[in-house]
Amino acid sequence: MVSFSIVITTYNRLSFLEKAIEKSLNQTQPCEVVIVDDCSNDGTEEYVRSLKDPRIVYHRNPQNLGHSPSVNEGVRIASGEWIKFLDDDDYLAPNCIEVMSKVISQHPQAAICSAQAFQIDPEGTELSCTQKVGQAPAFFVLQEDIHYGMLIEMLPFGTPVQVAAKKTAFFQSGGWDVNLNGNYDDIDSWIKIAEHGDALFINQPLAYRTIHPGCVTQQLSLEKRLKTNIDIKQKIYDRVHDKYKPQLPKSNDVQKFLELYWGLVGLKEGKIFPALRLIYPSLFSPTTFGRLAQTMYQRRLQKQALKLTPESETKEPLSLSNEKLFWVLPPTQNQIPNATPTTV
């Protein structure tokens, strides 16, 4: 069985943190729970210390450092082979660690693992569920295919509550970029971790993500969000495997596509003039509209494929498969899968 550490970062949200800790301690596969307190002044330290649970490792930053440095510190302290990331306002399903551990055990070449999550409001009401990736209950994607899948929006790893990573791969990737600190810092990390092994996807909701009105990213300007998104896409673009190069769009076309996308987001958010400034250059680029149409078509194909999969809840045990995703090219010689799917 794979050893896990849950790393919870927190700052002045004790009312949410209590549930995050409770659900982490009540996992069907017990594990270490690391809590990194970014200098809270709402009674967080007193509460955590009062729990007196030997599985809890509490660390208080010497000063307020921010989200990314706190994640890095939590992973440094953690003793598990795999790290389950968790923000203080989110929480895990009771079998999250157990299911991830079983799937990871079947494919030790993996460096990163993602599962579905329910999205809830601050009162705990379920709003939606993140989309499935593929049709199989659990499957792996070879390392050489990951970044192309991310580029064309077919492999969404999701937010920290959905993701676990191998600790060695986390450090090989350099950890979370403290210069991003809350703005795509998680996605930036998934991109880098995916250079160090295969990816696992579990089509089963194993976590709960709280959606707040006016979240941090929405408070940033459209231009700031666009710039960071372009930087992130460029990092993905630069890591796409050579076998996909003949079908890659030009980097400039990707940027224009993102300008159009964020312009449309701005219109939806009612930010008319900033949105029009972003959209205007793309109005004269047929390639950009072609790329938008292609992306929408690919997502439609994926949704149609998912409709063929029964919506009944995934039964354990999970058998890992090498699913044939429609956009994946044949593996190169040194990436031919050697894992035999097994049932645990």
Image (cartoon, rainbow, N blue to C red):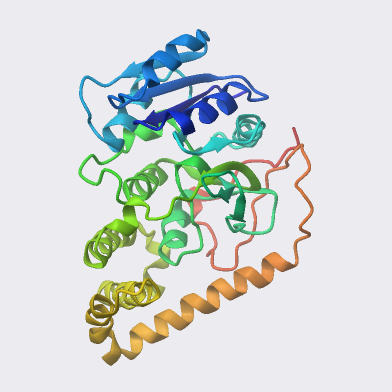
Q: Which residue shows up at 29% across the image and 75% down it? A: 259
Q: Is residue 230 visible?
A: yes
The quarter holding residue 344 reads top right
> Quarter holding the N terminus?
top right
Q: Is residue 112 visible?
A: no
Q: Is residue 323 left or right of residue 329?
A: right
Above or below, comparing residue 62 to residue 259 in the picture: above
The quarter holding residue 291 reads bottom left
Q: Which residue shows up at 68% across the image and 24% down it? A: 28
Count of numbered circles on the image: 0
Nearest to the observer: residue 276 or residue 212: 212
The spot of residue 294 in percent (x, y) is: 47, 80
Above or below, comparing residue 72 to residue 34 in the picture: below
Q: Is residue 217 left or right of residue 213?
A: left
Q: Which residue shows up at 22% across the image and 80% down it? A: 277
Nearest to the observer: residue 341 or residue 333: 341
Q: Which residue shows up at 27% across the image and 92% down it? A: 284
The spot of residue 264 in percent (x, y) is: 37, 77
Above or below, comparing residue 111 to residue 18 in the picture: below
Q: Is residue 13 left or right of residue 281?
A: right
Above or below, comparing residue 290 to residue 99 in the picture: below
The spot of residue 47 in percent (x, y) is: 44, 16
Nearest to the observer: residue 269 or residue 72: 269
The spot of residue 43 in percent (x, y) is: 37, 20
